[in-house]
Amino acid sequence: MGFILKLLLTGAAAMLAAYILPGVSIDGYMTAIILALVLAVLNAIVRPILVLLTIPVTILTLGLFLLVINALIILLADSLIAGFDTAGFLTALLFSLVLSVITAILDMIF
């Protein structure tokens, strides 16, 4: 039950973030839920591999390189999902930041 609620909240956060940011578009709420599911899978599989491969750079930048990894995962999701589009790397970076903040706020409420 908790996973489904988390997916729905992340989908709602993605819709809100797409509404706030001008370079991001999501076709509908079902696309946002699919985006949340794809992001969950990518964060479970791809993110640990990228973090492991970039440990020296992450240490050198005091962890700020993890933001770049988040943006790369958003761009990968953009290429996998037809109804989700981002304008570029900077937009994906801003989308990941806004999505994280909105998701954290929604997690505190629910």
Image: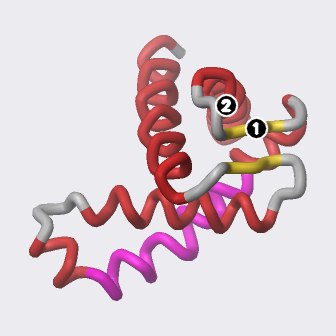
Would you call the spot at circle 1 few (<14 residues within 10 Å), some (14-19), or many (20 or more)? some
Amino acid at circle 2:
Ala
* Spot occupied by residue 71 in the image (x, y as percentages of width and height): 49, 58
Q: Position of residue 97 (x, y in %)?
A: 42, 39
Judged by its main secondary structure, the magenta piece is helix
Residue 61 is situated, as x and y percent measured from the top left of the image, at 14, 67
Single out the residue that lies furthest toward the top. 109
Label 2 SS: helix
**Residue 18 x %, y %:** 67, 31
Compared with residue 68, is residue 21 higher up or lower down, i.e. above or below?
Answer: above
Q: Looking at this view, is 62 or 87 the one in front?
A: 87
Location of residue 12 with respect to 65 vertically, above or below: above
Question: Circle 1 is placed at which residue position?
Answer: 25
Image position of 65 (left or right of 96)? left
Q: Amino acid at mark 1?
A: Ser
Q: Residue at x 23, y 81 (%)?
A: 55
Within 10 Å of the Cα at label 2, are there few (<14), some (14-19), or many (20+) other Cα atoms? many
Q: Is residue 16 above or below residue 39?
A: above
Q: Which residue corresponds to the image point at 83% horizontal and 58% vertical from the top-left?
A: 81
Residue at position x 30%, y 82% in the image: 54
Is residue 53 or residue 110 the one in the foreground?
53
Mark 2 in CB contact with mark 1 (< 8 angstroms): yes
- Label whose residue precedes the other's in the sequence (2 or 1): 2
The residue that disc 2 covers is 18
Q: Please state if 89 lies on the left or on the right of 16 as rendered.
A: left
Q: Nearer the viewer, residue 77 or 3?
A: 77
Per the model, the C-alpha gap separating discs 2 and 1 is: 6 Å
Q: Is residue 52 visible?
A: yes
What residue span does the magenta drawing correspond to?
37-54
Q: Secondary structure at mark 1?
A: strand
Q: Compared with residue 10, is residue 90 higher up or lower down, i.e. above or below? A: below
